[in-house]
Image: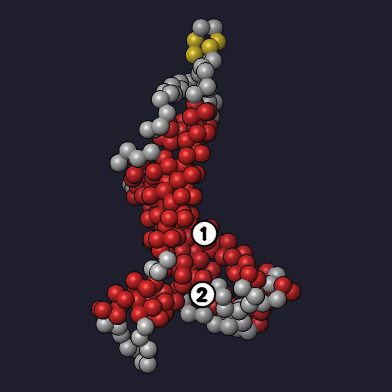
Amino acid sequence: QLVEGCTPLRGASSRFVGSLGSGYATGFVAGLAEYRKKLLSQGVVQASQASYSSLLRSAFSAGQGCSLWRRLHGAGCRSAVNDSCFFSIQYYLVNDKGWSAPQSYAGAAAFGVVGAFLFDTAVARMMLVPPWEAVPGTMRSVGAVIWERAGVARQDPRQGLSLRDMFRGVRGGYRGLCARAGEFAISYGCTGVVGVWIASATFSLPAIHLAGATTTISASWQNTRHAAERLCEDGVMIVKGLATTSVEVEFT
């Protein structure tokens, strides 16, 4: 909504740009919690060393504050790519292709996984390094994954990959993609089914009549009016294709 209000972008384009910002902010802020979880689950540090204050103190005491920032930045970039792909594709599939909510959620989730898969692999590796050790940046970590999966020994840092090795590295970097995409497609598809069921139950309630007239929804303030309109618009969009009940709302 902020992007549509401040820029000429509309529809899928506005959702793509807006989700880049919101996704990055979410991933960056949650990055430290994810880092702590990874370190504990893999036994990289002891529980006494895994408090948030200890992680920050260990990183800055060792002069690795920049590496800690790189981890959080990588988590933000991964979430930004995933969210922007998901929300823009989901909007496109519903409004331009006429897909139902479960179908669009499943398809968009699969696209999001494809877009962020290499970032997810690289960030996971960055998160397994103790806070007192240095890590490369996000793109260099992505490049390291491709180099490793290409199976080529890197003798010279300036050495490049042949086109054939690059293709093999990228293909190897996407190893396990089908399983991950299928997992997210099923999960988000079920979310869409539940959302449709809730929306259908909500908007198929019998109409309330007062003095022989259909009840009107009164919005005294302009922002309340816009919020209510948006709620009903989203509800109709979710139910589209699966529910037969029509919704008529009059604003006064």
Pointer 1 residue: 25
Which residue is drawn at the image coordinates 45% and 60% (left, top)? 180
**As drawn, is 221 to the left or to the right of 97?**
right
Q: Is residue 214 shown to the viewer in this render?
A: yes
In which image quadrant can residue 239 be found?
A: top left
Which residue type carries mark 1? Ala
Which residue is nearer to you in this view: 106 or 56?
Answer: 106
**As drawn, is 37 to the left or to the right of 189?**
right
Which residue is drawn at the image coordinates 30% and 85% (left, top)? 160
Q: How many marks?
A: 2
Q: In the rendered view, tell whether residue 8 sits above or below residue 182.
A: above
Label 1: few (<14), some (14–19) or many (≥20) C-alpha neighbours in 10 Å: some
**Residue 226, image x and y in percent?**
47, 33
Kind of element beneath mark 1: helix
**As drawn, is 29 to the left or to the right of 143?**
right
**Residue 64, image x and y in percent?**
58, 81
Which marked residue is nearer to the observer: mark 2 or mark 1? Answer: 2
Q: In the rendered view, tell whether residue 51 sits above or below residue 236.
A: below
Kind of element beneath mark 2: helix
**Residue 220, image x and y in percent?**
54, 26
Pointer 2 residue: 125
Which residue is drawn at the image coordinates 56% and 75% (left, top)? 128
Q: Residue furthest left?
A: 163
**Residue 208, image x and y in percent?**
54, 15
Which residue is nearer to you in this view: 249 or 144?
Answer: 144
Which residue type carries mark 2? Arg
